[in-house]
Amino acid sequence: MATYLEFEKPIAELDAKIAELEALAARKDGPSISDELAKLKTKSVRQLKQIYSELNAWRITQVARHPDRPHLSDFITTVFEDFEELAGDRVYGNDEAIIGGIARFKGRSVVLMGHEKGRTTEKRLKHNFGMAHPEGYRKAVRLMDLAEKFNLPVLSFPDTAGAYPGKGGEERGQAEAIARGTQRGLSLGVPFVTLIIGEGMSGGAIGIAAANRVLMMEYAIYSVISPEGCASILYRDATKAKDAAEAMGITAPELLKHKIVDGIVKEPVGGAHRDPQRAMAAAAKAIDAALQELEGMTPAELRAQRRERFYAIGREGL
């Protein structure tokens, strides 16, 4: 059953009417209503395009969090081949919020990692809603070490509301673990491409996103803090998250304009959740193109390019 966001109510009503007429027409003695159905479907598509052409930052935030949006596990089964998961940080344990391992992508071996939110209640609890503990970022560092040792490209897929903020995470060195992940990404001597597939919030995202190329799905968001967190700090009122989202510049076009991301992957009309296969195919094409641009660069060139890319952020106009 499709899940509709608050601003998609007109589409929900149209789709419900279409489903009702299709069920009526499917009856053995049902009336011929093909013309009416065609008109309603055309109207639904037209209205969907209209709504999604006018999305503000807060509505894009809602799309980025849509429960049916493709998750890392979907990318692994659809885009990659021969995935072999590698678990644990060799220090404390295995964090299910970050999944990583070795796989085949477009004929090449790669190391991949990313946040997994889970889709069912059971899976969400297992993956801690994609909020990683320190051992998750230490696992990411271990995977990056492995990639460099065997000269394999690294692909990462941030999708998190932020790193786990609880007592256990702080006791085990959350800030240090994220910093180590960021540092290791910047120092890699192999190509490193990141695709933000949903939420890329705070250090929880940047800990696995210090890449040569940072790409972003069209309706993903990327920021140092969530809109709710920003509103709580600046306005002392989390209900003003909508205002914060508008002011923060967290959408793909804004981030591309300021050169914080390097490219936007277009999504199907109505978001990736409406046609996940098409969305993931477009993402795979963009990742492949980014890897081809980086192949042939020496380790020193890759490090220099990555360093300059991040140093350049915020310099514009100075």
Image (tube, helix red, strand yellow):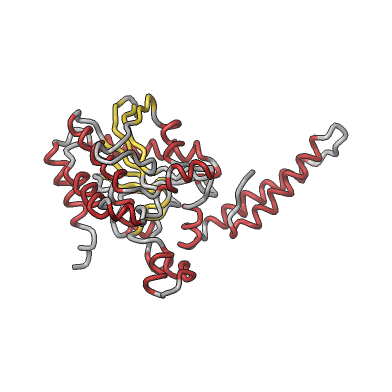
Q: Tell me the quarter of the image containing the C terminus.
A: bottom left
Relative to residue 237, is residue 208 depicted above or below?
A: above
Which of 47 and 65 lies nearest the eye of the viewer?
A: 65
On the picture, is 41 further left or further right than 310?
A: right
Residue 308 visible in the shown view: yes
Q: Position of residue 268 (x, y in %)?
A: 51, 45
Residue 140 visible in the shown view: no
Q: Residue at x 40, y 40 (%)?
A: 283
Q: Position of residue 104 (x, y in %)?
A: 34, 27
- The outermost residue toward the bottom is 235
Q: Tell me the quarter of the image containing the N terminus.
A: top right
On the picture, is 232 further left or further right than 147?
A: right
Q: Quadrant of residue 237?
A: bottom left
Q: Position of residue 229 (x, y in %)?
A: 40, 65
Relative to residue 57, is residue 284 depicted above or below?
A: above
- The outermost residue toward the left is 300
Q: Residue at x 44, y 48 (%)?
A: 129
- Give the tally of numbered discs: 0
Q: Quadrant of residue 71?
A: top left
On the picture, is 215 further left or further right than 60?
A: left
Q: Residue at x 74, y 49 (%)?
A: 17
Q: Residue at x 38, y 57 (%)?
A: 253
Relative to residue 145, is residue 108 depicted above or below?
A: above
